Every structure is written in C-alpha cells, then in structure tokens.
Image: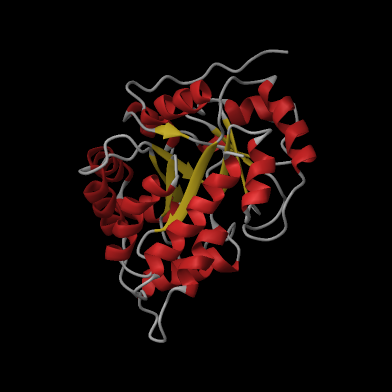
Amino acid sequence: MSTATSVQIAESRIDARFAELKDQGRAGLVTFITAGDPDTETTYQLLRALPEAGADLIEVGMPFSDPMADGPAIQASSQRALKNGISLAKTLEVVRRFRAEDSKTPVILMGYYNPIYHMGVDKFLTLASEAGVDGLIIVDLPPEEDRELCLPAIQAGLHWIRLATPTTDDKRLPKVLENTSGFLYYVSILGITGTRAAAAEEVGAAIERIKRHSKLPVAVGFGIRTPEHAAAIGKVADAAVVGSAIVERIAEGLDENGKAGAGLVDSVTELVRNLRTGLDR
C-alpha cells in the first residue's frame, strides 16, 4: 500500500517534539485550552504552566460564535471568551507573549475559518508566524478547499494538521493526508467533543490502518478525560489529546462572577500532571 509523502517544514518544533518523544519511548500529551477563557491573562498563565505540568504540545482554541464540531464544554468556553472581549488578534498576542518565554513547546491554533477569513488570510499568516505559531487545525476546511488557507499556510512555514475520523476509509485517507504535516489528529469517536470515549482496541486498529498510509505521528482526541484512559490511548497512539476535561476544570475554577478564581491555574495543572503520570505508566 502506498505511503503518503509528508510536507517538510523547516526547523519545526512539532517535528522536534515528536522525535524527542519517540527517542524517549513515551506518548505525548497534547492539551487544549480556549484563548481568552476566562480572560487573556489567565490564558497566558495557563500557557506558561502547562509545559512544566507535562504538556508536550498545546492547542489554543480560536473562539468562534458557532463552533459546530465542539461539545457543550468547549462551546461554553468560546462564549465566555467572546463575552470577555477576546479576538483573533488578541489570541495571537497571547501566543506571542508565551513564545517570548518558551522557544520549544509547539503551539497549534485550532478552530474555524470564519475569524481568519475576516482578518484576512495574508495578515493572519503573517501575524501567526511572527507570534510563533507552529501549526493550524481548521476543522471546517476539507482538502478540496486547500487553496483557501492550507497551501498559503504551508508556504508561510506553518504545519497543516488534518483530522481523520472512524469514517475516513482507505479511499478517502490519501486525500486527507495530502498536504498534512506535523501530525494527524485522529478523532476517535463520531460526533462532538467531550462526549463518550472510544476503546483503545478500536483506536489501535484505526491507527494501524493509518500508519499503512503515512509515517506521520498520530494524536488521538475526543473523549479522553482520565489518566487511565490517557494511558490506554498512549499505548497505541503517538499522543493523547485532552480538551474538554481541561476546559471543564477551568469552568469549575470560576467565581460567582465568572472570573478566574485564585486556584484555577493550580487546579488545571494538577489535572495535567495526573494525565501525564497516567501516560508515563
């Protein structure tokens, strides 16, 4: 069976991190937070704390008013962030601030095309590159629309990270892998984020099939909530992605006015440490 050719991005933090994880014989932990939830300063403090707590790569959600692929927890986080004045420009500024202190942890922006379209593709890619963004996951742009953003992003030196699902069959998979680099994000369940969890056996079989088409690392997300489940996924995947559980922990740390409580960052980092411990078992 043919193997898809991967896109090469020079001096890639993502490639370096996955190579490091492979050398160490461990699975990566990819954490997701929504930019501006509940405010930009808390987002910055979380970004600073996550790598030390055990996050190997960080996905930063770009809030959008109609996040149709996201479950209730991440939808609510987007609404909180938008209510508190987050914008795409402010999201990029938070990443830039983080990158000034951390030159190694890969940062991937995840979200929808609409905010990027309204900013302007060229302006967005320039600002994202300058801020130290490493890759993009844009969930509503299929391979057939690669000219919109994917190809310009690659030209700007950003990884284009694509989603594959249980319904991505062998006929469709080569198209999904086309122009994909950094890693492939395997959505382990059908439906929205933060709902049920897939069994590691199902995921393992899916990853074996994907690996017959590509040498890219495969990160698995949707439904991973506990150290035990992260550990099971880590045995079959190159990385586990945790989003809704972290976003819910952030929500639990808000005070009665919806502001960040004193222990919010510590509570989130405790969760991430526990997930990391699970993966390292």
Classify 213 as above or below 79: above
Is 277 or 129 nearer to us in this picture?
A: 277
Rendering quarter of residue 106? top left
State the quadrant of the C terminus.
top right
Regarding residue 202, the answer to whether it shows in the image is yes
Classify 231 as above or below 8: below
User: Which x, y percent locates residue 41?
Assistant: 27, 64
Classify 262 as above or below 223: below
Q: Is residue 67 left or right of residue 236?
A: left
Regarding residue 171, the answer to whether it shows in the image is no
State the quadrant of the N terminus.
top right
Classify 167 as above or below 189: above
Rendering quarter of residue 37? bottom left
User: Which x, y percent locates residue 111?
Assistant: 47, 52
Give the colour scheme shown: secondary structure
Residue that appears at 42% across and 45% down? 58
Q: Is residue 125 left or right of residue 199?
A: left
User: Which x, y percent locates residue 224?
Assistant: 64, 52
Q: Residue furthest bottom?
A: 256
Q: Residue furthest top?
A: 2
Residue that appears at 50% across and 36% down? 161
User: Which x, y percent locates residue 249?
Assistant: 50, 66
Residue that appears at 30% across and 59% down? 45
